[in-house]
Amino acid sequence: MDIQLLLALVLGIATIVVLVLRTRLDAFVALLIAALVTGLVAGQSPLDIVKAITTGFGNTLASIGIVIGLGVAIGKILEVSGAANALALAFLRLFGKGREPWAMGTVGALVSIPVFCDSGYVIMNPLARSIARVKRAGYVTLALALGVGMTLTHHLVPPTPGPLAVTGLLGADLGAVILTGLVFTVLLLPIAVTYAKWMGPKLESAVTEEVREAVYGRAALVGASDGSHHGSTGTITADDSPAQDEDLPDDPELDLGTPPEGAKPHRVGAFLASLPLLVPLLLIVLNTVTGAMDQNAQGVVGGKYEPSAWVVPFAFIGNPVIALIIGVLLAVYVLLPRWTPRSRVQHWFAEAAASAGLILLITGAGGALGQVLRSSGVGDALAEAIAATALPAFLVPFLVATLVRLAQGSGTVAMITAASVTAPLVGTLGIDPLVAAMACTAGSMILSYFNDSYFWVVTRFTGLEGTAALRGWSGITTAVWAGSIPLLFILNLILG
């Protein structure tokens, strides 16, 4: 690889890491400055760099911006309506007594598809505390399983903004990414639960006194002080439980407006709660399946093709934009009671748009960096260098995502950076876009630690500090990262 172009790539990635870690600038500005640095070092003219940045930014948001906004809106309504809580309780009942870690891991994975990890964990953690209080043991195991279940789908399954952005940057089929992400989640969840069940009891005695009392009651502190409590609360009685239910989920009716006199209390069942999430996903997957069947019947393998007449309706309703519009309509008119004020619903949408804003900007900036890599020749040079080695090409986005995640902590920034670097290589090296997308998302799961905001959410709610936090949370996220490597090799063998 030409030294100048290699230097351009290295300095571009280093710019992102240094600016995010050492300055007051965020990832959006860092990605744009990295695009400028990459283009200038590669020898591209300043005006061509600006054109590449604006073109890449616009093209990326044109394909994915609406979908991210709609997906975040659905997640917000699921959160405020109590639907997320209803789904969680249904899964707890489904798995049954004795399988609570599996239930919490599955709950986390389900809730985190439409809801951001941080807020999703805050919403669902009271369930883990309630179960541990009843069982009188096992809180750390449940909390770790819940947290890593959320990590899996947050990183692997659209319409979570990160993998959704990666899908758009790499031109992968959204339905295929959803299906593959779900398969990866199902296969990695046993690793997560096994680790939680192994490490959880070892860390139970390390839980802070404040959290231990909140979960198990005042007797937990007495037992811990006299040495009789080491992760088990067998001496606690029902009277020792907290007098108030401050650890239980808030009543969603407090946010849904004042019901008219005589109205029945608003409750969301698990079936209705699943509709705004399940229907769009099914429509998108149906579009993918019918399109693949039609291409096979026409003898067209990949690339653009003219859909048959019978496929057009599925292609329309299964388009991510249309499918998620349907999801938003279901969320508003099925999950919310008729007496919820319009102004309150619009306020929730405004909050969702605010939370999606930075993701949209980062995604667009990632597209800008990718376009600069293409137009400057860095992408082609990197592809040629990789082709001359024995390194499997799909490991490049995996390693880039891993390194960026370790350096700056954000999984979303890591996977978008990896996708931006990889996008110019997909066609040249013949990497399947689906494989590249999964490599970007899986690589970004590694070692959540001090520079990751979600690390602090999980460890503070779990009551773990210092080395206990690293052994519990950093360890379990690294375990699922490692478990994804053989899955990527298998996927590449199937599609490569």
Image (cartoon, helix red, strand yellow):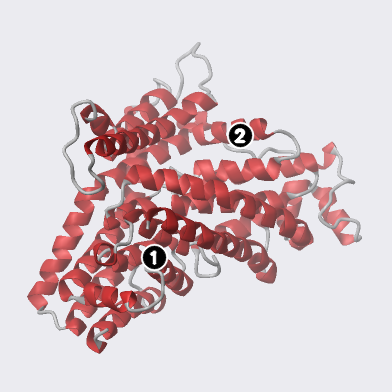
Pointer 2 residue: 91
In the displayed structure image, the side of residue 374 where residue 164 appears, left or right: right
Which residue sits at x=22%, y=37%? Answer: 298
When asked about the image quadrant of residue 379, the answer is bottom left
- The three-letter amino acid code for the residue at tag 1 is Phe
Q: Nearer the viewer, residue 347 or 376?
A: 376
Q: Is residue 4 above or below residue 235?
A: below
Q: Secondary structure at mark 2?
A: helix
Residue 134 location (% of width, % of height): 77, 39
In the displayed structure image, the side of residue 487 where residue 297 appears, left or right: left
Residue 104 location (% of width, % of height): 63, 43
Residue 291 location (% of width, % of height): 28, 36
Residue 400 location (% of width, % of height): 40, 71
- The three-letter amino acid code for the residue at tag 2 is Phe
Q: Nearer the viewer, residue 27 or 336?
A: 27
- Evaluate whether residue 336 shows in this view: no
Q: Is residue 131 above or below residue 337?
A: below
Nearer the camera: disc 1 or disc 2? 1
Pointer 1 residue: 394
Q: Is residue 265 above or below residue 248?
A: above
Q: CA distance from mark 1 to mark 2?
A: 35 Å
Q: Earlier in the sequence, mark 1 or mark 2?
A: 2
In the displayed structure image, the side of residue 369 where residue 246 appears, left or right: right
Q: Quadrant of the C terminus?
A: bottom left
Which residue sits at x=50%, y=11%? Answer: 262
Q: Are marks 1 and 2 in contact (CB under 8 Å)?
A: no
- Evaluate whether residue 174 shows in this view: yes
Q: Quadrant of the N terminus?
A: bottom left
